[in-house]
């Protein structure tokens, strides 16, 4: 059985919503929802952040924290580099953990049963990462790429010739939801990505995932809190 640590990556800066991970939703900081969910999984939890207020939330909940270097907390920083830094930190003294479960605070309404099922998928020794998906609401055959200057356009994915309704389109398109990611530390160093030829997938039933990126997402999130 793989030895999994939960990593909650939560940098302080954000363009769309200032101090996004600390924004209060129904009286509670956004990051607290993910911390409380993570504690239900009975795995060791680490928050990695460059922000002292976010690191303080780790103290409040009695979990471990990792001081993320500034160069890993910019708008252009890649999450994979943050995870590599975190994995080195948590195994600095002894190689205790061989895998990470990544829970992003911005996706804060999760189903415990689904994440546990995702971990079961990850138990397969032939799989080195698991990515959560949800069925696409906007079908690619109904989406266009538009050049505003020339007004040239094309469908992202052409539908069957002569198709007149969505029922005739292929139904195998999915969106990487951000619900959770699982990966062996070894694969993260090797591929620098969750996605490769040894990736498994977990398809969530969630048609309207809540992911906080813009101010209007907060209002939508408040209408969905009954799902927790």
Image (cartoon, helix red, strand yellow):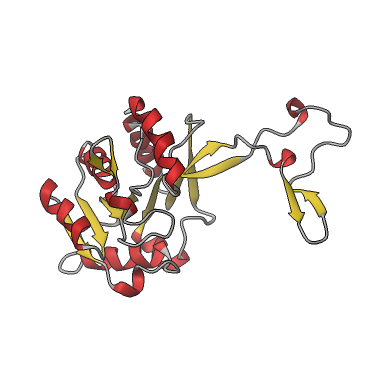
Where, quadrant-wise, is the C terminus in this rendering? Answer: top left
Q: Nearer the viewer, residue 168 or 99?
A: 168
Q: Is residue 194 left or right of residue 88?
A: right
Residue 21 placed where, x, y %? 31, 51
At a point 26% along the width and 67% down the height, the residue shown is 68
At a point 23% along the width and 40% down the height, the residue shown is 28
Residue 101 placed where, x, y %? 33, 49
Most distant residue in the bottom direction? 71
Whether residue 64 is situated above or below residue 136 in the rendered picture: below
User: Is residue 123 among the parts visible in the rendering?
Assistant: yes
Q: Nearer the viewer, residue 103 or 21?
A: 21
At a point 40% along the width and 48% down the height, the residue shown is 181
Whether residue 143 is situated above or below residue 169 in the rendered picture: below
Where, quadrant-wise, is the N terminus in this rendering? Answer: top left
Residue 33 placed where, x, y %? 27, 40
Q: Nearer the viewer, residue 43 or 160?
A: 160
User: Is residue 127 among the parts visible in the rendering?
Assistant: no
At a point 78% along the width and 27% down the height, the residue shown is 165
Displayed quadrant of residue 26: top left
Whether residue 16 is situated above or below residue 28 in the rendered picture: below
Residue 66 placed where, x, y %? 21, 63
**Total numbered circles:** 0
């Amino acid at each position: 059985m793989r030895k999994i640590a939960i990593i909650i990556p939560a940098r302080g800066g954000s363009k769309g919503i200032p101090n996004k991970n600390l924004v209060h939703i129904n009286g509670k900081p956004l990051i607290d929802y993910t911390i409380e969910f993570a504690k239900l999984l009975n795995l060791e939890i680490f928050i990695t952040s460059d922000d002292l207020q976010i690191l303080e939330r780790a103290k409040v909940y009695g979990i471990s924290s990792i001081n993320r270097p500034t160069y890993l907390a910019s708008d252009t920083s890649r999450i994979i580099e943050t995870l590599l830094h975190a994995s080195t930190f948590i195994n600095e003294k002894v190689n205790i953990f061989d895998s990470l479960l990544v829970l992003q605070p911005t996706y804060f309404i999760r189903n415990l049963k689904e994440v546990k099922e995702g971990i079961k998928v990850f138990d397969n020794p032939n799989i080195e990462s698991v990515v959560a998906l949800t069925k696409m609401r906007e079908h690619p055959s109904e989406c266009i790429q538009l050049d505003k200057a020339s007004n040239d356009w094309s469908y992202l994915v052409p539908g069957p010739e002569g198709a007149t309704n969505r029922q005739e389109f292929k139904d195998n398109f999915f969106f990487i939801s951000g619900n959770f990611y699982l990966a062996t530390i070894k694969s993260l160093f090797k591929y620098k990505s969750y996605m490769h030829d040894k990736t498994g997938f977990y398809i969530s039933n969630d048609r309207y995932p809540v992911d906080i990126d813009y101010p209007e997402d907060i209002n939508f999130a408040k209408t969905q809190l009954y799902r927790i």
